Image (cartoon, rainbow, N blue to C red):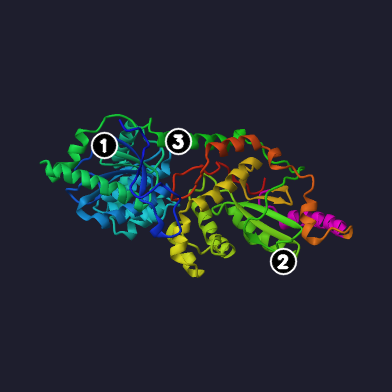
């Protein structure tokens, strides 16, 4: 038997998503055992009626990688036509009401013949699945709105959602998205090149079956005849991803995090994107969440006051801490980092806090990038690279090590201030730092070295409140990517908006 997790590579090894499409490698990480995955006449599917390849996809509308995966599926159906069929399965988490409501909304729309209209809208606007928003979606796609709302309120379409969840549980599925291509298990987001390699291989196998006398309409049934019944839990890739999730969740548990002391000074790494002169003696590092109202307040009130009062002496640098309670925050942070790759971090950062911005989804990010004159094709490519994901993950891990449990979180030359306090709180601390800087400068310290001199004696990273816990999490997740295009690890920190304590 071929071992689990074998890499199917037709053109080379799997690498990070490259900058240029012609450098992509056609590879996808799969389990080469086939599993029995039943389909039915009432399935919602796109593609051919008698396909050579059937892909069954479990996804959650609140899961950004799932949304990107469905965009890939749409493109694949365009490429393969009648040879490919992609089947929808609802992947929801028990007790997560918003995700369950979104799935039932899709099924309720399907009851009126508009499943796919609702499906694509839900992935386009993943930030809010409240009843008022779902009503607007129903109106937009022309549903009988009273009937739709009644179906949601009465739970009429809970049964297909539960059916899909039970099938997922029987197969041992956990991280999403999860797919089966003619029974072959594919976990997480995979790019189009990788899927093409796998589909082409499966089409070749199907055509050989037809040469041996199997009717086209019976191809999937024939694949299932030789498949095994069971769970995918022992799949190497599933174990790796679940292990990463568990380690990240353990590291992010607020009960295990020691918070930063307001009496200490921490050597918070500098050099992140931000505003102000590079040789400023005072560096303010802010950890932000783009869906946090207190972060917006700080952006609109605190930071402008600092920049206006200390234009030459204060630099503000932005780090990202998307909170678990804000499902779109991680994608927004990724978009800001991506814009920074083209030198537009500050402008994009500001737009994400603007009152008139649409929902924090990929289409909105692209629209804002166009307004700022970015290279859109490069923006779309960079958005999904491992490099951008690693930068976001690095900020999240740094926040964990420091013990930040809410946003915004500020460090003024390493001195911690929690929440969006009044500007006076920050100016008082900045004035203290500048007074020390003047003394050092009078003693002969050049301006370029003032910040380093002020940071003398600060607690180093190995002395941070949760240094060992965070290091363990990092070692367990060597390639963390909390982003919309790869497996969702590490998980955003389960903190809350800090606000005023």
Residue 37: give its label: 1
Mark 1 and mark 2 lie on one chain; the one further toward the N terminus is 1
- 280 left or right of 236 in image: right
Earlier-in-chain disc, 3 versus 1: 1
The numbered disc on residue 424 is: none
Q: Residues within 10 Å of mark 3 (few under 14, many from 20)?
A: few
Give yes or no for residue 10 being in the magenta stretch: no
Mark 1 or 2, closer to the camera: 1
Q: Position of 469 compared to 78: left or right?
A: right
Which residue is nearer to you in this view: 449 or 411? 449
Furthest-left residue in view? Answer: 213
Disc 2 residue crowd, few under 14, some 14–19, many 20+, Cα 10 Å: few
| Quadrant in which the N terminus is drawn | top left
Taking the spot 49% from the left edge, 46% from the top edge, the residue there is 481
First in residue order: circle 3 vs circle 2: 3
Residue occupying image coordinates x 38% and y 33%: 235
Numbered label attached to residue 240: 3
Circle 1 — which element? loop
Residue at 51%, 54% in the rendered image: 334
Q: Which residues are magenta?
A: 418-441
Residue 482: % across, % down? 50, 47
**Dot 1 alpha-carbon crowd within 10 angstroms: few under 14, some 14 to 19, many 20 or more:** many
- Marks 1 and 2, how far apart in space? 62 Å
Q: Kindly report the distance in space between the C-alpha atoms of the residues bearing marks 3 and 1.
A: 23 Å
Residue marked by disc 2: 308
Q: Which image quadrant is residue 260 in?
A: top right
Q: Camera-side residue: 45 or 130? A: 45
Secondary element at image label 2: helix
Q: Is residue 39 visible?
A: yes
Note whether 8 is above or below 367 in the view shown.
above
């Amino acid at each position: 038997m071929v071992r689990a997790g074998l890499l199917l590579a037709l053109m080379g090894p799997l690498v990070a998503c490259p900058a240029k499409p012609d450098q992509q490698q056609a590879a996808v990480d799969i389990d080469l055992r086939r599993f029995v995955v039943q389909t039915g006449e009432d399935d919602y599917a796109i593609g051919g009626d008698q396909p050579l390849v059937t892909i069954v996809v479990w996804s959650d509308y609140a899961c950004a990688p799932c949304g990107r995966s469905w965009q890939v599926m749409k493109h694949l159906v365009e490429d393969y036509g009648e040879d490919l069929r992609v089947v929808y399965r609802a992947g929801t988490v028990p007790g997560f009401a918003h995700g369950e409501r979104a799935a039932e909304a899709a099924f309720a729309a399907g009851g009126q013949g508009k499943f796919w209209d609702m499906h694509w809208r839900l992935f386009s606007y993943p930030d809010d699945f409240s009843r008022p928003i779902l009503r607007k979606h129903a109106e937009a796609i022309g549903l009988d709105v009273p009937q739709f709302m009644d179906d949601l309120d009465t739970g009429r379409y809970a049964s297909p959602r539960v059916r899909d969840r039970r099938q997922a549980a029987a197969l041992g599925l956990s991280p999403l998205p999860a797919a089966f291509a003619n029974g072959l298990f594919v976990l997480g987001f995979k790019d189009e090149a990788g899927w093409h390699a796998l589909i082409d291989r499966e089409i070749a196998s199907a055509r050989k079956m037809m040469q041996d006398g199997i009717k086209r309409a019976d191809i999937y049934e024939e694949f299932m005849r030789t498949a095994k019944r069971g769970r995918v839990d022992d799949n190497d890739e599933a174990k790796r991803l679940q292990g990463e999730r568990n380690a990240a969740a353990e590291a992010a548990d607020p009960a295990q995090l020691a918070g930063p002391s307001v009496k200490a000074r921490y050597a918070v790494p500098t050099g992140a994107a931000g505003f102000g002169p590079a040789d400023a003696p005072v560096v303010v590092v802010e950890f932000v969440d783009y869906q946090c109202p207190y972060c917006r307040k700080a952006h609109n009130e605190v930071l402008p006051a600092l920049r206006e009062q200390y234009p030459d002496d204060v630099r503000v640098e932005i780090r990202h801490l998307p909170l678990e309670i804000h499902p779109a925050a991680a994608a927004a942070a990724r978009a800001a980092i991506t814009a920074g790759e083209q030198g537009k971090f500050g402008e994009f950062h500001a737009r994400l806090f603007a009152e008139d911005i649409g929902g924090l989804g990929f289409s909105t990010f692209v629209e804002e990038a166009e307004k700022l004159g970015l290279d859109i094709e490069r923006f779309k490519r960079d958005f999904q690279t491992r490099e951008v994901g690693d930068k976001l993950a690095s900020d999240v891990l740094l926040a964990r090590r420091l013990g930040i449990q809410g946003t915004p979180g500020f460090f003024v030359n390493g001195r911690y201030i929690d929440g969006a306090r009044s500007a006076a709180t920050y100016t008082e601390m900045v004035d203290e730092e500048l007074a020390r800087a003047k003394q050092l400068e009078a003693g002969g310290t050049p301006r370029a070295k003032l910040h380093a001199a002020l940071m003398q004696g600060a607690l180093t990273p190995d002395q941070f409140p949760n240094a060992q816990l965070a290091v363990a999490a990092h070692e367990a997740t060597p390639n963390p990517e909390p982003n919309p295009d790869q497996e969702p690890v590490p998980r955003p920190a389960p903190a809350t908006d800090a606000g005023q304590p």
